[in-house]
Amino acid sequence: MQERLTREEAVEARLSQILQRSDFPALSEHIQELLAGLASPSASAGVISHIIGKDVGLSLRIIRTANSIQYNRSGRQILALPHAVALMGLETIRDLAAGLMMVHHFRSRPPGVRQLLALSLLSANHAREGARASNYPRAEEAYLCGLFRNLGEVLVACYFPEDYAQVLGHMTANRTGEKESCLRLLGFPYEELGREVVRRWNLPSQVARVLDETAPTAIVSLYSEEQHLALLAGFGHELTAALHRVPPDQCAARLERVLHGFGKPLRLTGKALGGIAHSAVENTKATFKTLQLPLDQLRLEKQVELALHAGLLAPPEAHRGDEASPEWDELARDIHNGELQQLLGRILDLGLHTGGFDRAVFGLVTPEHDAIRARLHAGSASEEWAGRFGFPLERRAGPLTAALVGKRDLYVCGGPYLDSGFARTLEAGCFVLLPVVIGGIVAGCLYFDRPSPPGAARKDEPEAPRNLVRARDLAAEAIAARHAGTAGGI
């Protein structure tokens, strides 16, 4: 009788079989170099463009994505790689590179494996949206960890399909959980195989850590950033399972489990899940379309719609100013012409008009990159009030650090950021803070707010209105064009 292998031996045996396969490539050298470059504090559009340029296929996909309506709103074709990288932002480039790596590895596999790949992308997008909603400062890390959270299952399904079928059959026949069935039939849980492959690929250490068995899945007290990241990866994985992997009659119980385990520590309400689920579906569809892959029969939208119809999810709120406007199209056409300060003034005015706010500022980072100051203001903002918009850029907790150091958008209408010194200085009752990033460097920000009378009800609205995001993107494009030499500075 053959002696039963330990968990470590069982993982090593499977890993050896996978590595011996001719169809299991090492992680692309260019992707490794790109991920390392993007993780560097000194990353710039020029450096990243040079790395991308070594891979013709990746370069073409970046250019094609930059010319999509999602990023290129000016109507002018983007041909230069540095322009594409500056326009899309380093976080988006990193997401796309990681997605490309996963997709290129498994794109030619049977439909069932491609569906698992789609589920991995959903988990990644759930984790990223959860990071934004729970104020994790680096949403792209959450995306990567969510993306590879299910790698072990994808590997077993791809390279050991008969064993994978037995695990699924055992779960159904015995009504056992995934881990119990994996331990019984494989000798290890999926995560342990995924973790070893992540290490072989030299992916960021954060990705391997969230696959550790000791990674937290539920915390109710204070936690570290490392634990926060593990919570986000677990949240993305569990929300995907609740919405897309269980029969409809089990959806409510699984969603309740997600909220019970992750709602309190991540400060997420049941209402927030609807917006997160909707955004994840849209982003996953866009990624598959960009990579020219079918989504097979997963019916992502249908399953979210069923959950919404059954009242299991609250519908995502339509934000003020989301409607199409010919004024935005006209401004986009003019973005490469005229004087920069005048264009930025038009952007602020139109953002106020369509975004539902009262005051606006364009803030410019000082040449020493140690502070930000108001350069332009609009709306009901007075000179005295705009003069208060001068803050040091310090690596301490707060909305300014989260937005400008973390390079992420903030929409704050409730929560601890309204009690920060930043919000109190500006007497803000609700505000949007959008970093303007040029070539990977934060050049400034757009800020919109409205005051609220004492005692006014606070409302959590985690996603900035799209027209304000569009205003920031146009400002970044206008400034980048001037820095390229097409017009004067500001």
Image (spheres, rainbow, N blue to C red):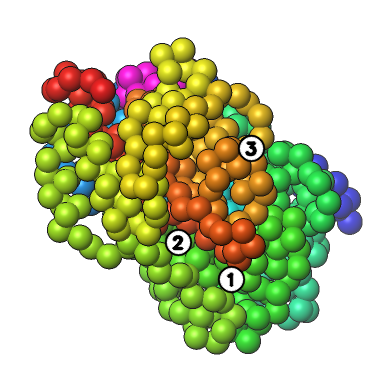
* Disc 1: CA contacts within 10 A as few (<14), some (14-19) or many (>=20): some
In front of the other: 8 or 318:
318
Residue 66 in the image, given as x and y percentages of width and height = 26, 41
In front of the other: 85 or 168:
85
Work out whether 11 lies above or below 476: below
Is 49 contained in the magenta span? Answer: yes
> Could you tell me how far apart the alpha carbons at marks 3 and 2 are, in whole angstroms?
31 Å
Residue tagged 1: 271
> Could you tell me how far apart the alpha carbons at marks 1 and 2 are, in whole angstroms?
14 Å
* Disc 3: CA contacts within 10 A as few (<14), some (14-19) or many (>=20): few
Residue type at mark 1 is Lys
Q: What's drawn in magenta, residue-wise?
A: 42-52
Q: Which of the two labelled residues, at mark 1 and mark 3, occupies the earlier sequence position? A: 1
Q: In the image, is 175 to the left or to the right of 374?
A: right
Q: In the image, is 299 to the left or to the right of 347?
A: right
- Mark 2 lies on a secondary structure that is helix
- Mark 3 lies on a secondary structure that is helix
Residue type at mark 2 is Ser
Image quadrant assignment for residue 105: top left
Residue tagged 2: 279
> Could you tell me how far apart the alpha carbons at marks 1 and 3 are, in whole angstroms?
28 Å
Is 214 contained in the magenta span? Answer: no
Between tags 3 and 2, which lies in front?
3
Q: Which of the two labelled residues, at mark 3 and mark 2, occupies the earlier sequence position? A: 2
Residue tagged 3: 421
Residue 142 in the image, given as x and y percentages of width and height = 58, 45
Residue type at mark 3 is Gly
Residue 78 in the image, given as x and y percentages of width and height = 17, 36
